[in-house]
Image (spheres, rainbow, N blue to C red):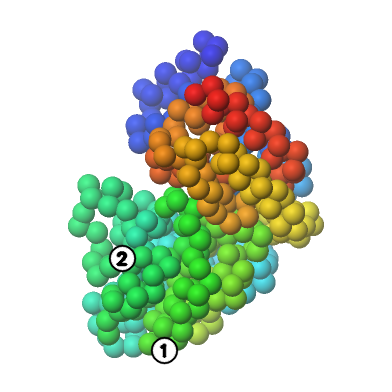
Amino acid sequence: MSKEMQNYIDDAEKALLHTYNRYQIVLDHGDGVYLYDTDGKKYLDFVAGIAVFALGYNNKEYNDALKRQIDKLIHTSNYYYNVPAVEAAKKLKRASGMDRVFFTNSGAEANEGAIKAARKYAYLKDGCTDHEIIAMNHSFHGRTYGALSVTGNKKYREAFEPMIGNISFAELNDFESVLDRVTEKTCAVMLEPVQGEGGLIPASEDFLKKLRALCDERDILLIFDEVQCGMGRTGYMYAWQRYGVKPDIMTTAKALGCGVPIGAFLMTEHVGQSSLAAGDHGTTYGGNPLACAAADKVLDLFEEYRVLENVREVAPYLEKRLDEVMAEYDFITERRGVALMQGLVFDRPVAPIISKAIENGLILINAGANIIRFVPPLVITKQNVDDMIDILVKSINEM
């Protein structure tokens, strides 16, 4: 490490609030599926900013679209319409199959809005404010208070309790555990179709279909958090489309802006007409022209580059190569995930392996203490997979 890089790290530790244990590199720029640090060292990136940079780095068409918008208009507030927001909303509706869009600044903020919409929907039915939400154990929905309240991991919540009330937790893929928690006050069931931080665990088709039937029968809203698993990562624009189980409310973010902070919560027309109204929710920055220009271009490029087709072609190869690695080491116990959202489960902490991989020029991330998560740019090739496996195996052997 150069003295310059160490100085940056030292300055960061003095200036930034220490809420992250950062890896000891300072990233400077990216190109394609590679990142470079301030010393010029090259890294193959299989994290993509935590499933954000779906199109890879330094995409000229994307960059030019943002530059054009910067020269026109960056922000106006939501007291006025702007063209990029209208265009992005129309394309997002087509991609998602939903009817109404509210743009936010992040995935956590989108989940906050989804929770509010569900409770307002129930409030309008009976005028009560004691409605309940069922979420899933091992889920992750964000760090803000509402999103944290439905996050099914005590270690994230316990220091900040009390959370918002009337939340209970069921087990993913255990329909009876959901039924056990349903009461006449239940207004929503909320889950990730593929749990990310919770361990790369997909919901089963049978479980989702039973939830949909339950919610239809009892007028309960089904909320899908597609912040990480959405935007093509499973080979479908949104993971629920894999099973044909449509939610009433859906959240999205991460790859929606490919690096520019933008999220959204979306809903069916029925929920849109029966929940949030003028004055119920708002955001200063959400839906601004710059962020929406990013989303608008991303949605265009997904089609132009046939991103979904690439995911469906490369993902089986990634699964095959990860299975080969698993077969080589008895301390790797399982491969989990869907398409380009994969995890290898170890019987020991993976932090030393990830650190060694970074040292060897490969950026990886964990999901919990003993899982290595693979969420690369969606434009990776089979050669990129081979290169990643070579470095991963080298790093495991060196450890």
Q: Position of residue 206 (x, y in %)?
A: 50, 75
**Which residue is painted at 41% across and 89% down in the image?**
217
Say which amino acid is labelled 2. Phe
Tag 1–tag 2 contact (CB < 8 Å):
no
Q: Is any atom of residue 260 visible in this view?
A: no
Please report whichever mark, 1 or 2, sits nearer to the chain's N-terminal start: 2
Q: Which circle marks residue 169 in the picture?
A: 2
Instruction: Specify whether 268 is left or right of 380.
Output: left
**Badge 1: few (under 14), some or many (20 or more) residues near its Cα, within 10 Å?**
few
Residue underneath mark 1: 217
Q: Position of residue 208 (x, y in %)?
A: 49, 74
In the displayed structure, does residue 25 sit left or right of residue 113? Answer: right
**Of 171 and 55, the residue lying toward us:** 171
Image quadrant containing the N terminus = top right
Residue at (52% x, 17% y) in the render: 5
In front of the other: 33 or 251: 33
Q: Is residue 239 visible?
A: yes
In this rendering, the answer to whether 337 lies above or below 39 is below
> Quick one: SS at disc 1?
helix
Please name the residue shown 40% across and 35% down the image: 349
| Structural distance between the alpha carbons of marks 1 and 2 | 21 Å
From the viewer's perspective, is residue 175 above or below residue 10? below
Give the class, few, some or many, for how many residues have Cα within 10 Å of label 2's Cα (few <14, many ≥20): many
Q: Nearer the viewer, residue 92 or 306?
A: 306
User: Residue 339 in the image: x percent, y percent?
Assistant: 63, 55
Give the structural element (helix, strand or loop) at label 2: strand
Q: Which residue is at 45% across, 34% downward?
A: 350
Q: Is residue 32 above or below residue 305?
A: above
Query: What number is the disc on residue 181?
Result: none
> Three-letter amino acid code at disc 1?
Glu
Q: Position of residue 104 (x, y in %)?
A: 49, 59
